Every structure is written in C-alpha cells, then in structure tokens.
Image (cartoon, grey):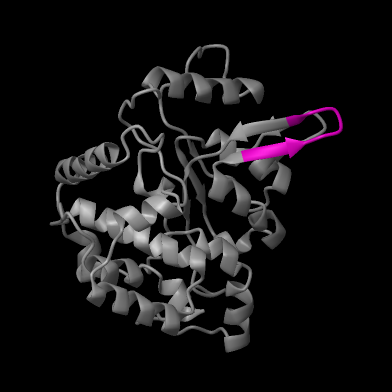
Amino acid sequence: MRPAGRASAQQRPGRSRQGINLGKTKLYSVTGQLGRDRSLITQRPFRSPHHTVSDAGLIGGGSVPKPGEISLAHNGVLFLDELPEFNRQVLEVLRQPLEEGTVTIARAAASVAYPARCIFVAAANPCPCGYLGDTVRPCGCSDAQVQRYMARISGPLLDRIDIHIEVPRLKHDELLRPGKGEPSAAIRQRVQAARDVQERRFAGSGIFVNAAMNSKQTRASCQLEPAGEELLKAAITRLGLSARAYDRVLKLARTIADLAGAERVDVPHVAEAIQYRSLDRQL
C-alpha cells in the first residue's frame, strides 16, 4: 500500500535540511525519546507501532498532550504491519492527519498542533489465514470471514492510500537466484529527476510534490487527452471510485508521467495509476 504523505530528501528553498532536522529533534525531545547522547536527529524516522497501539499512542494525546507515532514519523515513514489487526477506531483517527499533514489535540487549557506529514505504508494479509489466492496452499476461510476481515479497513481510509499492490508467493528458484532488477542507483536517479521536475513545476507555491496539489493545481497539471478522460470515466463507473480516489489517481498518473519524462499525462500513465487501485476492484 501506498503512501498518503510524502517527504523529500533534498534541500528545498525555505525548508532546509537543518530546519527539518530541528523539527524532528523537537518532537523526539517532547516525548523524552531523544536520549542524552543525541543533540540532533539527522536521519529520517521509521516508526512501526504494534497493532495494540491506542489512538492516543498513534496520533498523540494525554492529559499533557504529546505527539504520537504519526508525528514521530514526520518527514519519514509510518509503517503499520498487519493493518486489519489494528482496532478499527484507532485506524479511523488517521484519516484527518493523513489528509492535512497535521494533528491538532484540543484540551481545556490549550490546543496543540503537531506536524504529521509522513509516508504511510501498510501491509495486510488477504484473509485471516493468509492464503486467499495462493497457488500452492488453499485458503480455509469462508467468504463471510474474508469480508469481515477486510471490512476492518474502511473505505475512507483506503481512499487515502495511493497505491495498492498485491504481492504473490515467490517460487523457490526466485528466492534463491540473484535478482536481475534495475539497480537502486538508477532508480534513485530517475526519482530525483522526477522530484526536480516537480520542484520547478511548483516553484514559489509552497509545495514540492504532486501529492500536495490542491484542486486548481491538479486541474492545471493533470490535463488529459480525450482517450485518457474516457478511460478514467470508465474506471470511476466500474470501480465506484470516490472523488478523493479520483484525485489521487490523477496525481499518481502525473507522477508516473514525471518518472517517464513525459510532458503530458497520457493513456498509459492513467491506466497504470488505475491498476494500483486493486482493493477498490476487490471491494
């Protein structure tokens, strides 16, 4: 599953690496997690709370408000493993922070706002036993069990996840033989080139990536040819995509085009973005 918030590793005008590090350091200092031997956090955080975490532990709270896991993951990664095992009400409190990038905790004496713009990544089994769709071991779950299991993740939360990816079982020889994929250095170079394109596109606007576009910016940057519009219209009709999911498909298609070095968003970019809504197709 794909990220809802994003963070950039390169230095930006008005948003220096030093400023990012100071912001992270302040958050960890407030929660008492900085440690005496560290004066400045220089690495992007990776937070992976257990599925028994409370809503206050996840987004922050307490009688004396403290930041939660999503704020501690600011400018980094928040990873939730076994997503359906989390309490549904706990997951629901993520919706507003993932959308706005901030968490506001109101108490009688004061109201505190903590930053919460992170890359949100989650993993889940397809069913309680984990073998639904497996080509080797049959699934022992009933249809009702599978539906109840997946219903623990609400539609509005899924709308805020840009990419849904199904990971099939690897064969024995695939596990043993060395990979022949693209080198990480080449991928990094392509991603950096796309980030540079987006920085030029949004120069002076206060945003740096496609995911942060508002409606007006989305319409201006994601103009589609008639064939692309027809494809997206058909996907909305067949998959029942919400307005939020529609916007995210457009933004993702724009990013795919940027990675391909394309000026305009074309049919292949829209088609690939739609394919990343696999849970919409299932549910």
Q: Nearer the viewer, residue 133 or 259?
A: 259
The answer to whether residue 193 is seen in the rendering is yes
The location of residue 241, given as percent across then percent down, is: 47, 74
Q: Is residue 50 visible?
A: no
Q: Is residue 33 above or below residue 6?
A: above
User: Is residue 105 in the magenta section?
Assistant: yes
Percent across and percent down for residue 89 are 71, 59
Looking at the picture, does residue 214 appear above or below residue 104?
Answer: below
Q: Residue at x 44, y 83 (%)?
A: 237
Residue at the bottom extreme of this rendering? 143
Indicate left or right for 57 with 146 as reference: right
Q: Is residue 202 above or below residue 239?
A: above
Residue drawn 17% across and 56% down? 179
Q: Count up the numbered dots.
A: 0
Image quarter of the N terminus: bottom left
Q: Nearer the viewer, residue 233 or 87?
A: 233
Residue for point 40% across, 70% down? 277
Which corner quadrant of the image does residue 102 belong to?
top right
Asked if residue 259 is among those painted magenta in the image, a careful observer would answer no
Could you say where residue 50 lies in the image, as x and y percent from the top left? Answer: 61, 48
Instruction: Give the percent coordinates (x, y) of residue 84.
Output: 59, 64
In the rendered structure, the answer to whether residue 87 lies left or right of residue 160 reads right
Residue lying furthest right in this view?
A: 108
Identified at 48% across, 41% down, the residue is 118
Provide the residue span drawn in magenta: 103-111
